[in-house]
Image (cartoon, rainbow, N blue to C red):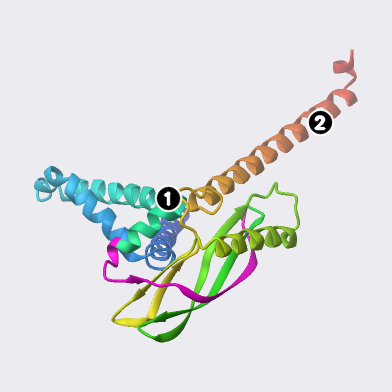
């Protein structure tokens, strides 16, 4: 009976783990990032593994596994690099939407907000409402989550103060016209705004968020280990104090 229960529980957790992994990949590929990033990774892996594909029929399972792992590594590296560099993200969009035209904003209104985080203090982010003109007509659009700034849990400032600081930096970018807007000439109501064109923006990147989250996890883990060690030490010390033989 125990063996049967263990078998059922193993199957359950295996299926559950698979669902969690697939769900996480779905969110990452289809919601958090443009699907074309994943296609870039697939094409790059295929182009650099043509010899492996020749063995596809001979060892289907091993070849497929290696290609999937390589695709995952390349994809994570790609989205990390693009999140670290707003400039590269702009360049990627320009080349993948080569027929889109740059336009100037007639009005641009930022709305900075705060989002509490898990294993980190949280992040400031800004939504942008803007107007632009194309072929004599005025269009309105918005860019949700145009820019992020993540804060680790050891940041002692209040969220209100952090949002105010972030809002000032956003206003400076707008005043200096550091943003960039592209519109689809065939559907002018469609446009894309990039608030930052910086070559490197570490604190607003996926990589910074992952690293600070990992640091928080490690510190919590070390804290738990230290607490267990101290508790064991005090317990042993208490036994020694109450043992007359050990006292001697």
Reply above or below: 230 against 157: above
Residue furthest toward the top? 248
Viewer-closest of 237 and 141: 141
Q: Position of residue 50 (x, y in %)?
A: 13, 46
Q: Is residue 124 magenta?
A: no
Instruction: Please tell me whether residue 105 belongs to the stretch shown in magenta.
Output: yes
For the C terminus, which image quadrant?
top right
Q: Residue furthest front?
A: 136
**In this picture, residue 53 sits left or right of residue 226:** left
The residue tagged 1 is: 80
Q: CA distance from mark 1 to mark 2?
A: 45 Å
Residue 160 appears in the figure? yes
On the picture, is 5 further left or further right than 38? Answer: right
Q: Secondary structure at mark 1?
A: helix
Residue 60 image label: none
Q: Earlier in the sequence, mark 1 or mark 2?
A: 1
Vertical placement of residue 172 versus 214, above or below:
below
Mark 2, residue position:
234
């Amino acid at each position: 009976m125990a063996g049967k229960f263990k078998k059922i529980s193993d199957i359950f957790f295996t299926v559950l783990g698979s669902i969690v992994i697939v769900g996480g990949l779905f969110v990452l590929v289809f919601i958090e990032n443009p699907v074309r990033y994943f296609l870039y990774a697939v094409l790059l892996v295929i182009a650099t593994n043509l010899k492996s594909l020749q063995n596809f029929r001979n060892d289907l399972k091993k070849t497929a596994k290696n290609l999937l792992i390589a695709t995952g590594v390349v994809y994570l590296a790609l989205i990390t690099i693009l999140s670290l560099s707003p400039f590269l993200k702009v360049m990627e969009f320009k080349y993948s939407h080569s027929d889109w035209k740059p336009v100037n904003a007639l009005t641009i209104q930022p709305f900075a907000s705060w989002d509490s985080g898990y294993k980190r203090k949280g992040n400031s982010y800004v939504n942008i409402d803007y107007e632009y003109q194309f072929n004599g007509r005025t269009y309105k659009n918005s860019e949700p989550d145009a820019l992020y700034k993540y804060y680790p849990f050891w940041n002692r400032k209040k969220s209100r103060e952090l949002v105010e600081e972030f809002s000032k930096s956003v206003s400076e970018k707008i005043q200096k016209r550091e943003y960039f807007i592209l519109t689809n000439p065939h559907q002018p109501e469609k446009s894309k705004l990039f608030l930052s064109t910086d070559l490197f923006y570490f604190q607003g990147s996926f990589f910074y968020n992952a690293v600070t989250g990992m640091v928080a996890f490690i510190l919590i883990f070390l804290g738990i280990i230290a607490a267990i060690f101290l508790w064991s030490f005090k317990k042993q010390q208490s036994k020694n104090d109450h043992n007359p033989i050990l006292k001697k």
